Amino acid sequence: MKRKTVVLLPILLLPVLAAANPATAKQQCMRQVVDVRLVSQYTKHCASPRAEAAGYQTLQRQIEHKLQEQDCLNRLDMDDHIHIRGSLSRFYGDPAQFCPVLKNQMPQIKQRYRSR
């Protein structure tokens, strides 16, 4: 009886896992779009000296490569882009206000793409 359960359980779970995968991929894409925009803002307005800015430009290219590799922009619909734009709205305007927040987020973003 235990053998049948062990054999049947993965078979029964495959459709569930397959259905969850597109949602996971979409969430990953949304995270990458947010990350690339945050790194771009940080590089343009907050990073100094030049060496730091160059490092973040490299990170930005890495994330952009991931976006293309996973065809992320085609996975996201207009509602996703509106949601992303809303979540990023606090990072536009006065750099004196958003740079400290971005500076705190940069190590986490770098860590996400370090081993990829």
Image (tube, grey):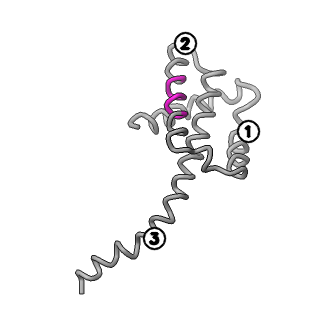
| Classed neighbour count for the residue bearing mark 3: other residues with Cα under 10 Å, few (<14), some (14–19), many (≥20) | few
Toward which corner of the image does residue 14 lie, by quadrant?
bottom left
Q: Is residue 26 positioned above or below 51 on the image?
A: below
Quadrant assignment for the N terminus: bottom left
Of the two numbered discs 3 and 2 in the rendering, the one whose residue sits closer to the viewer: 3
Using the image as rendered, state which of residue 116 and residue 76 is in the foreground.
76
List the residue tagged with mark 3.
15
Question: For the residue labelled by badge 3, is the local secondary structure a helix, a strand or a loop?
Answer: helix
Residue type at mark 1 is Ser
Q: Is 62 in the magenta?
A: yes
Question: For the residue labelled by badge 2, is the local secondary structure a helix, a strand or a loop?
Answer: helix
**Between discs 1 and 3, the one toward the N terminus:** 3
Q: Which residues are magenta?
A: 57-64
Estimate the x, y position of residue 74 in percent, counting from the top left. 62, 47
Q: Is 43 in the magenta?
A: no
Residue drawn at 58 percent across, 30 percent down: 39
List the residue tagged with mark 2.
50
Tell me the distance, in whole angstroms, between the alpha carbons under discs 1 and 3: 38 Å
Residue type at mark 2 is Arg
Residue drawn at 62 percent across, 28 percent down: 40
**Between discs 3 and 2, the one toward the N terminus:** 3
Question: For the residue labelled by badge 1, is the local secondary structure a helix, a strand or a loop?
Answer: helix
Q: Which residue in the rendered view is the most extreme toward the top?
A: 50
